[in-house]
Amino acid sequence: MYEQRFDKRAFDELRPMEAETGIIANANGSARFRIGNTEAIAAVYGPQEVKPKHLEKVDRGLIVCKYDMMPFSVPDRAKPGFDRRDMEISDVITNALNRAVLLEEFPRSMIDVRVYVSQADAGTRCASLTAASMACADAGLPMRDLVAAVAAGKIGDSICLDLTKEEEDFHEGGATDVPIAFLPSKNEIVLLQLDGKVSREDLKKIVEIGKLGAHKIYELEKKALRRRFSNES
Amino acid sequence: MTQLKNYDIVTPGELLSEQGSDGSGTYVENGKLFSKYFGMLQINDRGISVTPFTGVYEPREGDDVVGQVVEVSSKYWVVDINAPYYTRLDSRDVNFRADIDDLARYIQMGDLIYARVFRIYANHAADISMRGTKYAKLPSKMITKVDPMKLPRLIGKEGTMINLIKNETHCEIVIGQNGIVWVDGEKDKMDLAISAIKLVESEYHNPKLMEKVTEMFEHVRAKV
């Protein structure tokens, strides 16, 4: 049984969040997103010439994403470099961004998205995707919508939002982790993964609770973007 | 969502209007109008449009640009004009007689040129030309990059801002519409001009920008 969460949050409560854009001067767009102890930094370069050339698409642009965990982001050092997990997460982020960015507006070009996780406490792919979408907007790319991503899941018998590492490793009753990404104003799911075991009804509940969280993240994203150009005069 | 006003800041995917009539920077989905960019909303009698705050340079016909030669082929030069794609300068489109197969004699790799975008293809490729007396190869001095969306502020109303910088620093400055700014002058003055340009870029949404730049020059003059 899991009646009270380890960090005393309500079951549908997000961890404290923080977002910021325009943090890397050399990139066309950049953003930082922190949720609890998970923090991701994203930089967007481009649109630019496609390298390597054979990847070029005649009718649309290309997003090349690289996700990486910094060596000091986890308690036992993460080996630097591109491993299988990084590859998978890079792919799911690319797929989600492909739905958000209007790629047909810049044919034959490439957008380089770099995401680095500086602190990891579960939900890194969601934090990375959120940061990457903010960086894309900051780079002035034409987009259908921002992406808001959050992990939800089932711990024991309770449906929870925004799991921590401690909860992901919960043993009694099992833990199910479902990272979800939305285009909030379109009500469209662009990423849905499932790690664990869950019934169909529970999955629906998890997606519903994830949607609530995503909308809160979406509001924060909009606020962070606006803050860059308003009140400073 | 009807509380949106002129000059409001909008983010991508923000609902602008229930009826669709797309202007620039917007798109229509299911009959509703959404913003395509992170930018500023503009509502006028022609409709609703969104101007992005940031972005890469997108070449348009007739733009005067500063570019750097990245490749010399036997019949043309390939030039990086800070756009998503490289452009081509044909050996026939220059204001001097160029013998083909020996183009590196005239303009070499790494050289800076001032040229005009004269043709845009359907696939967004562009050709540039150096025909005309004002276009030339630029001696390699200092260049700096400015966000092309912020160029209007650097030029100022009828060139007031850039003339201020030119007069204060006695530098020759060439602004390419692609955001590359070429500066020539005495060494210290070039640094000063570039720091002024950077100040404009970082404070471009400041309504009292002109005063701020003047202040900076006065501050420097007081120190000397």
Image (cartoon, grey):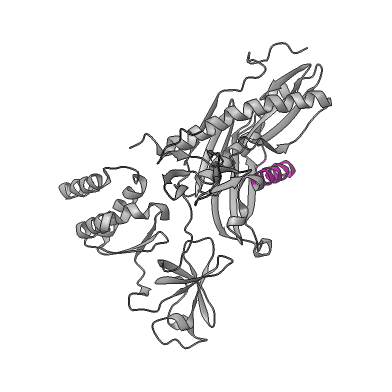
Q: Position of residue A6 (x, y in %)?
A: 67, 15
Q: Report the span colored magenta.
A: A79-97
Asked if residue A4 lies left or right of residue B145, the reply is: right
Asked if residue A134 lies left or right of residue B63, the reply is: right
Asked if residue B192 lies left or right of residue A170, the reply is: left
Residue B108 shows up from this direction = yes
Does the magenta run of residues contain A81?
yes
Q: Position of residue B206 (x, y in %)?
A: 31, 42
Compared with A55, A92 (above or below) is above
Residue found at x 71% / y 38% = A191
Q: Quadrant of the N terminus of chain A?
A: top right
Q: Quadrant of the C terminus of chain A?
A: top left
Residue found at x 68% / y 27% = A210
Quadrant of res B142: bottom left
The front one of A230 and A127 is A230
Q: Position of residue B208 (x, y in %)?
A: 26, 43
Quadrant of res A206: top right
